Image: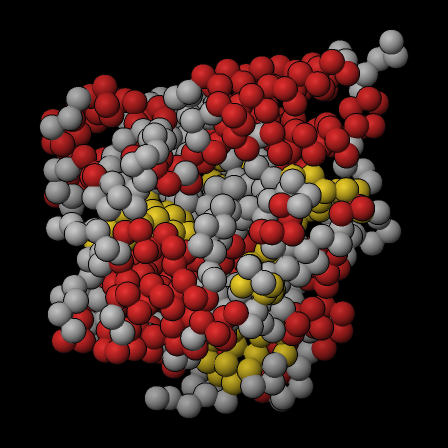
């Protein structure tokens, strides 16, 4: 996997974030492992500590294994105003997890995030690459169900 | 070119995707095929139609019929009734008050003039609207200094928030002799409530590219980068596609139009960090580092990415440039106010009937924007406050509704135009809760580099949490303003400097909300 990704990018530090995105997307557990950090460090000729610093700075990256589907619920003021707190409660109830945790079946990880820029449809969440807006408690159940069927 | 009887425009953007547009489009295609209409009726995927809160919608030309709130069950009826028999299904069409709003919404547009009308994934559509004529004019008839002078004369000011005059910014970098200069677009739109740049990039990516080309030529940059936030998947896709098209057509690349000018445009993506909207943090991120801001000077225009002279501009700002060059600075000055020329894209959300967007003259009254374009405060509810400019914005009470939305007028009220986000709150809104949400946001997004911001946010979060629990006092309110004020004076970058605005305005105008949370002394 690493070789294929590295082939697309010249070994320069400026490509680090791109490479990390690709590795994380390709990983079935949606995270960057220690092994990955070492491989990237070797390819780009930079210190693993630099990569770790970058990984922990940006919210889209995770250094811990996550579920197959990563749910990112927006908690910024426009969504907060439209009830994101209730949505969070409902999600936690449906999935039986707290923020940052992964469901026991490994299907979902629940995360919070900052503004996704779809505020006209607040409250909003992103599951993997898909945006879901105008959320209601009923809608949440349906959406979560739709990801259970192997999607 | 194939001739079609009707064109169905379907807006594909993050909002309509969220509403399930793809499924409906697939059924529509199938139904058209079933009725042998595929050769007569064209389906065109375009940017946002400018309608929000109306589910999946589509507009049919030349009839100019707009359907809203479509479900999968409606499609067969529309195809047989409208496209086969020529009778639009009035049950599903946009009704009068909304229709007026929709038509009105297209007046006076500059940066979003094509959005919702053309196919953003076909450069031919952009060319048909007069696209890339300004770029050709620049390359064949104008010297770089002429371009800088024209943009300076137009009075164009940065639309990212600070409002710095674009032509002047360019004039700092243009005369610098360097082997390589860079032109960077800040598309890290992260200010809560802001999605104007997303609409431009999703709806008309070539307009942004043309602006980048003209700007790069003006300052002498032969490499341009668009730094875009990682969450904007559709924007990234559409820009990548548009850049590939531009290379194919020889609009960018080596020796463009035999002019001797070379230009490459590349995309850099972020990974979720609000602070990267600050230009020096953005540059750090572009280089593959943590997005910690740099100290200024040197300013990026002199020494930016990889120590090269780097001009950083916002998406909306640069999307204005092609029209300014094509139609002239005098034409541009005809929009907006004295000192704040042109139009501004506002995003309207919260307790309004029609959350969405509008592009209007700079200086349009806040009341007009909320009433005409936002459809007014939700029926049966009272206006309480508007948070203008995003999380780093200002709470405006009802007495300030007539303020003109431009850089200068808002300054008089110690407010900022910011990114143009307008969050409307009705009488049920609790300003304590809103301020809590804002402080929580900044606490999370502080990069931690300087202690005023890192520690200040933590202290503010403790205070607002205390007030929220009903354990606060009026002294806590004074302390919050004092801390935020100290952060304003001592923080390293705009992130830490911003919080004083929402805090001061919330406490000043809505003190009653805070006092309600305090136990009787």
Horizontal placement of B172 versus B450: left or right?
A: left
Q: Position of residue B356 (x, y in %)?
A: 62, 57
In the image, residue B94 sits, relative to residue B294, either above or below, namely below
Q: Where is residue A146 in the image (x, y as percent from the top left)?
A: 52, 44
Quadrant position of the C terminus of chain A in the picture: top left
Residue drawn at (87%, 9%) of the image: B521
Depth check, front residue: B157 or B168: B168
Quadrant position of the N terminus of chain A in the picture: top left
Depth check, front residue: B146 or B390: B146
Residue drawn at (48%, 74%) of the image: B330
Residue drawn at (82%, 22%) of the image: B515
Q: Confirm whether residue B143 shows in the render.
A: yes
Q: Position of residue A40 (x, y in %)?
A: 17, 29
- Within the image, what quadrant is residue B520 found in? top right
In the image, residue A143 sits, relative to residue B367, either above or below, namely above
Residue drawn at (69%, 39%) of the image: B395
In the image, residue B210 sits, relative to residue A138, either above or below, namely below
Horizontal placement of B103 versus B305: left or right?
A: right
- Within the image, what quadrant is residue A128 found in? top left
Residue at the extreme top of the image, as rendered: B521
């Amino acid at each position: 996997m690493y070789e294929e990704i590295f082939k697309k990018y010249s070994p320069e530090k400026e490509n680090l974030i791109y490479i990390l995105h690709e590795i994380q997307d390709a990983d079935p557990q949606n995270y960057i492992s220690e092994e990955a950090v070492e491989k990237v460090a070797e390819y780009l000729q930079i210190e693993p500590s630099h990569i770790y610093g970058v990984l922990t700075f940006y919210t889209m990256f995770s250094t811990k294994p996550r579920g197959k589907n990563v749910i990112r619920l927006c908690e910024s003021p426009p969504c907060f105003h439209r009830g994101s707190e209730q949505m969070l409660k409902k999600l936690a109830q449906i999935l039986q997890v707290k923020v940052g945790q992964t469901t026991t079946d490994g299907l979902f990880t629940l995360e919070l995030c900052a503004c996704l820029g779809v505020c006209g449809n607040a409250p909003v969440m992103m599951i993997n690459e898909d945006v879901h807006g105008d959320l209601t408690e009923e809608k949440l159940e349906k959406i979560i169900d739709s990801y259970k069927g192997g999607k | 070119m194939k001739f079609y009887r009707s064109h169905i425009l379907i807006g594909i953007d993050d909002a309509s995707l969220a509403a399930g547009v793809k499924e409906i489009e697939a059924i529509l295609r199938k139904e058209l095929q079933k009725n042998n209409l595929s050769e007569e009726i064209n389906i065109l995927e375009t940017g946002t139609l400018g309608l929000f809160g109306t589910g999946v919608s589509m507009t049919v030309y030349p009839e100019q019929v707009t359907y809203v709130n479509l479900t999968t069950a409606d499609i067969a009826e529309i195809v047989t009734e409208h496209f086969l028999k020529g009778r639009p299904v009035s049950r599903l069409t946009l009704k009068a008050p909304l229709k007026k709003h929709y038509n009105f919404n297209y007046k006076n547009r500059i940066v979003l003039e094509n959005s919702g009308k053309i196919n953003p994934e076909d450069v031919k559509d952009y060319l048909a609207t007069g696209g890339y004529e300004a770029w050709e004019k620049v390359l064949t008839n104008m010297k770089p200094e002429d371009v800088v002078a024209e943009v300076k004369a137009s009075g164009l000011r940065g639309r990212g928030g600070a409002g710095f005059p674009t032509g002047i910014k360019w004039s700092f970098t243009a005369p610098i002799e360097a082997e390589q200069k860079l032109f960077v677009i800040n598309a890290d739109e992260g200010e809560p409530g802001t999605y104007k740049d997303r609409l431009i990039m999703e709806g008309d990516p070539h307009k942004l590219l043309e602006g980048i080309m003209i700007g790069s030529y003006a300052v002498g940059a032969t490499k341009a980068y668009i730094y875009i936030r990682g969450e904007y998947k559709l924007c990234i896709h559409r820009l990548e596609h548009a850049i590939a098209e531009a290379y194919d057509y020889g609009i960018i690349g080596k020796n463009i139009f035999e002019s001797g000018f070379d230009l490459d445009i590349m995309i850099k993506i972020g990974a979720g960090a609000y602070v990267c909207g600050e230009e020096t943090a953005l540059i750090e991120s572009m280089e593959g580092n943590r997005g910690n801001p740099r100290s200024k000077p040197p300013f990026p225009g002199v020494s930016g990415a990889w120590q090269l002279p780097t001009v950083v501009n916002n998406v909306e700002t640069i999307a204005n440039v092609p029209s300014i060059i094509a139609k002239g600075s005098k034409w541009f000055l005809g929009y907006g106010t004295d000192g704040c020329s042109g139009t501004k894209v506002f995003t309207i959300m919260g307790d309004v009937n029609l959350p969405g967007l509008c592009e209007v003259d700079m200086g349009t009254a806040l009341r007009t924007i909320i009433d005409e374009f936002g459809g007014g405060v939700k029926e049966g509810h009272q206006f309480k406050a508007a948070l203008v400019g995003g999380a780093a914005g200002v709470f405006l009470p009802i007495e300030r509704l007539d303020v003109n939305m431009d850089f200068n007028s808002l300054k008089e009220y110690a407010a900022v135009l910011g990114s143009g986000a307008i969050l409307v709150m009705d009488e049920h809104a609790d300003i304590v809760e809103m301020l809590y949400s804002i402080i929580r946001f900044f606490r999370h997004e502080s990069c931690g580099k300087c202690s005023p911001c890192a520690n200040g946010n933590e202290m503010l979060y403790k205070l607002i949490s205390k007030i929220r629990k009903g354990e606060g006092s009026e002294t806590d309110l004074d302390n919050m303003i004092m801390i935020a004020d100290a952060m304003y004076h001592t923080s390293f970058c705009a992130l830490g400097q911003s919080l004083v605005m929402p805090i001061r305005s919330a406490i000043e105008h809505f003190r009653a909300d805070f006092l309600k949370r305090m136990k009787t002394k």
